[in-house]
Every structure is written in structure tokens, then in C-alpha cells.
Amino acid sequence: MPFTGKATFSAGADLPELMEDVSDIIGMVSPYETPLLDAIGDSTRQAFSTVHEWLEDELLPNVDSINQASFSPNPENATGITVFNGQRFRAGDLLRPVGGREVIQVISVAVNVLTVVRRYGGTLATALTNGQRLLILSSPALEGDDRPEPRSSSRVRRRNFAQIFTASVDISGSMLASRAIGVRDEMDYQKQQRARELLRDLENAVLNGIAPSAAPQGSATVRRSMNGLFSLVTTNNMAPGAGGIAAGGGAGADLNEAVLNSALRQIWESASSSVDLIVCPAGLKRRINGFASASRRTAMGEDAFGDVINIYESDFGTCRVLLSRYMPTDSLLLLDSSRVEVLPLQGRSFGFRKLAMTGDRESGQMVGEYTLELRNELAHGAVRNLT
């Protein structure tokens, strides 16, 4: 029979692979789930620049703190009070020291020094302390008086950077022509694997990413990377200490309900939104599960014991508790998920591009470019230094 270059049914009948007994199922145990991205969901918008910006605004603050170590003649009768932000006050304001019942009236404001009348309306005196917060109750106006001096807040531009996520696929002509066990199309299989890896990397970047300190917009020599949640949450960046939860840090402490509720309360006091998502690593998830262990009972005859808390309800919001393997082991994230979005750059959501053939192989590249938009970072929090 002349050579035709085609395979025949009789050729290769004795090749070893035709006698192998190999399952067509390929097992994989590598973790590739993305719980935070799944919880946030797909964005309804796209970014239009590699430097993504958004606007934020806030109402004029109605609270400040005392910045004064000593009081004359004493904390119950001092009529001069130094505060951190004198521009928040004006003559006529009624104040109440947090933790006390006294009402104080402001007579005049000189930079950061308030001249006040104590025990307004016959209220009981409060001993003022350094660092104590002053709540502005209201600012009564005089009948027929001129309009007050106008005040307003300024809108602020926030920004983050779009990060490129990419992986390549190279399949030789021989591999494409060969029959692989468990795989119908080697190119499709490799594309699926690379896509899982890139989604895993995106989840990690959303949590832990940080932009370079110099030229964060990127250059020919600087790789552009996004700031993640831990980088963007700065105000409510808390840690347990001797006095409970506080900004800054302290020695490592156990996570318990008092610590968690104190953190949720601090965020509630800072913003009008409610935390609805608690993101935690495995060890701290087990601590949250243990909140109810002491009160849980199992009746005789029951052969199943549950010790899982997936929803945590508090006075400051109902929170879904999310386990993520990419979280730092000593930290929690407390998020208002309605203010968190992961946006693709326009036309740059994850996709595969087939490249020109160079030699005896087929090549392609998986590419996506994404950024994180965290609106109103006061609405979110992070708790660190937990054991």
C-alpha cells in the first residue's frame, strides 16, 4: 500500500496507551475560590482610565474633642475650652460633653479657644477632661438677626489605580494533535486553569494590594498595582488595647464579642451606613463561631453538632461572616459592601487573545485590568493585632 500520510485503523494497535486503564477525570485540590469577589458581585460600571477617581462629600461635623490638659479654675467651672477644630463652632452653639448631662453655650470662638457659659438652662455641671468629645446639639438663632456666616464642606477626589493581570498559554503542535487523557481540547483546558489563577490573584489584590510609593500610575520601569482594602481603610484602623478597641494598635488580644461590637460601634459613630460584611481568616472565623458555644445545647438522640455562625446580628448592623484564606491571620475587615466595587477598565475584563503563530505552536494571552473603588472609607473598618 503506498504511503498516504494518513492514519489507518490498523496502525498503532499495539501502542501502550491503548491498553492503559486511566480515568478521564482530572482531580485538582488547589484552592481557587474567590469569596469576597462573589460577595461583592459584578460591577455595573467600568473604569475609563488607569487612574480611576471618584468624588466623596460629607456634612459639616457636629462633634470635636477637647485639647486641654488643665482647666481654670477647675474642670467644673472653666469658661475657656481649647478644642482641636475651632472652625466647627460658632457663637450661640449649644454643646454637651459626651458622658455628661451639662449643656454649654459658646459665646465666642478665637481660633481653637471657645469662650463659653457653663450649666446652660440649669443643667448639672460635668467635670471636663482632656480628649473628651463635645457634641454640638444645635445653634439657636436670634430673632431678626442677620444670616449666619455661610459654611460648607468641600467635595474630595479619591483615586486608585488599574492593575493588569495576565498569563500566557503556549501549546505545541504535537500536543494539540495528540489525544490527551481527560481533556478534549488542551488549549481550552489551559485557558480555564489560567483564568482561575488570575481570579485568585485579583481577590488577593483587592484585599492586600498596595500601590508603589513612587510613580503609582506606572511607567516603563514601574509596574502599576492597585491599593487593596487594607491600604484604603485608614480612619477606622483599629486594634484591641487596654481601654478596649481604639485607633492605632496594642498588644495582640483575643477576638470576642466585646471587641467586635466595639469596632462595629466605632464605625457606626463615624458614618451613617451599616457594616454588612465581616471578612476574616480561618482562625478568627472559628473565634466568631465560638461566641455561641457556651449557650449551645445538644439533646439526647441528636447525632449532629453545629458550630458555625454565618450571620452575626448586632445593634450596629446585620453582618454576613465571610471566610477568606487570603486574609492576614490577625485581622478582620468590616465592610459596607454597597460601597465596594471591583471595576474592569473599559474593554479590559478578563478575556483570551490568540496570538500569531511563531513556529510549531499556538499561543495566547489571558489579560484583564481591574481597579478597586472603596467609597467613603469612614463607612468601613479594619481590626488588627488579634490572636
Image: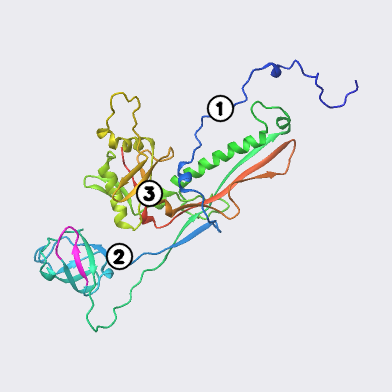
Residue 276's tag is: 3
Alpha carbon of mark 2 to alpha carbon of mark 1: how far? 57 Å
Q: Secondary structure at mark 2?
A: loop
- Marks 2/3 in contact by CB < 8 Å: the verdict is no
Mark 1, residue position: 27
**At label 2, which amino acid type do we have?**
Pro
Q: Is residue 8 above or below residue 73?
A: above
Q: Position of residue 288 (x, y in %)?
A: 32, 38
Tell me the quarter of the picture where residue 74 sits. bottom left
Earlier residue among tags 2 and 3: 2
Q: Main secondary structure of the magenta part?
A: loop
**At label 3, which amino acid type do we have?**
Asp
Badge 3 crowding class, 10 Å Cα cut-off, few under 14, some 14 to 19, many 20 or more, is many
Alpha carbon of mark 1 to alpha carbon of mark 3: how far? 36 Å
Tell me if residue 248 can be seen.
no
Residue sitting at x 70%, y 27%: 179
Q: Secondary structure at mark 1?
A: loop
Tell me the quarter of the picture where residue 294 sits. top left
**At label 1, which amino acid type do we have?**
Gly
